[in-house]
Amino acid sequence: MCDETVTEASVLLDWYNKNARTMPWRIGPQRSEGGVGPDPYHVWMSEIMLQQTTVAAVRDYYLKFIKRWPTVFDLAKAKDEDVMAAWAGLGYYARARNLLKCARVVAADLDGIFPSNEGELQKLPGIGPYTSAAIASIAFDRPATVLDGNVERVMARYHLVKEPLPKSKEKLRQLAKTMLPAKRFGDYSQAIMDLGATICTPRSPSCSICPWMAACKARGLGIAADLPNKLAKVKIPTRYGTCFVAVRQDGAVLLERRPDKGLLGGMLGWPGSDWSTDKLEVIPPFEASWQVLPTEARHTFTHFHLKLRIQKTIVADDTTQDVGTFFDVKTFDVNDLPTIMRKVWKLAMPVA
């Protein structure tokens, strides 16, 4: 580790001492330097939620989960459907399933204690290289190299890496590793992520107030905003499907729980077809006077756009042939549905 690296790390930590973002799962730099460590359960929970999701979107979900399940033992005992319902709207639902699996392994096999090293952490459900590094660094102050999108951007600009992502990812990881400080690893990891989130932003970076502006090679050439380079995105396909909204004469609605595996696995939703790149004719789940609504529900997932046609009917109590379960709209919380299913609800259900 060269003297310049130590100096740059120290400069960033000094900046973090004054500018650290306040987050409900974070131990601030003053408390950290005073010897107060974060709860690994809180760090793990936040990092799982933050996978491919913004801090703003996660904050309220995190607070809700910690209040309802304050320890890993509480979460391990939770019902699957309760956790999936609480997660509804946050997206990437495999994370919620892995959250439960991981909590149960930690509670049952590890006496509620999360491992402190990356290798052991990666043996747990839902924890990959990035998340294991973040937990090891932030929760246990280990010298782990945390590389999220913010850090990739900072490294590409600071070191003038023009090779596009994702090809340059490993190079950026090695460069980030060379810049680790001699101590305060958790604070440093959070500092460099904060730098990318608040100063070294994707567009219009605030180079004039950056603590690393003097040494940043991209800034020196006036091209910081142009990096990192990325390969051209592949156009994502559109899939089509049909969902069936059955309303009982007393106003209750018919919902079913999706299979545990697959997209939206374990979540409540409307009975419906598979999602296909072709517009296929779909057989309703039971005979009824189905009416096709003039509007469709649209949603974009990571790898495809989705367009759902909606068919609706009013049914008697005994006409659904054991498809799904009826829920009283007066007591059912629509927020327990994933986003696309809530969009269908908004289009199909009359406003009270």
Image (spheres, rainbow, N blue to C red):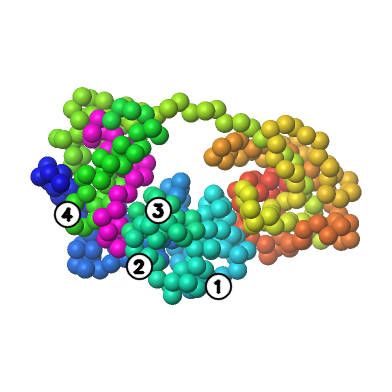
| Residue type highlighted by circle 2 | Asp
Classify 237 as above or below 39: above
Coordinates of residue 286 in the picture (x, y in percent):
86, 50
Q: Give the labeled residue for mark 1.
A: 77
Q: Give the labeled residue for mark 2.
A: 39
Given contact means CB atoms under 8 Å apart, are the residues at marks 3 and 1 in contact? no
Gap in angstroms between the C-alphas marked 3 and 1: 23 Å
What residue is drawn where x is 73% and y is 56%? 255
Gap in angstroms between the C-alphas marked 2 and 3: 15 Å
In terms of image quadrants, where is residue 267?
Answer: bottom right
In terms of image quadrants, where is residue 249?
Answer: bottom right
Label 3 element class: helix
Q: Give the labeled residue for mark 3.
A: 131
Counting residues from the N terminus, which is met first, the one under dot 1 or under dot 4? 1
Q: Residues within 10 Å of mark 3 (few under 14, many from 20)?
A: many
Given contact means CB atoms under 8 Å apart, are the residues at marks 4 and 2 in contact? no
Given contact means CB atoms under 8 Å apart, are the residues at marks 2 and 3 in contact? no
Labels 3, 1: front one: 3
Q: Give the labeled residue for mark 4.
A: 182
Labels 1, 4: front one: 4
Q: Is residue 197 visible?
A: no
Relative side of 141 to 253, left or right: left
Q: Which residues are magenta?
A: 137-160
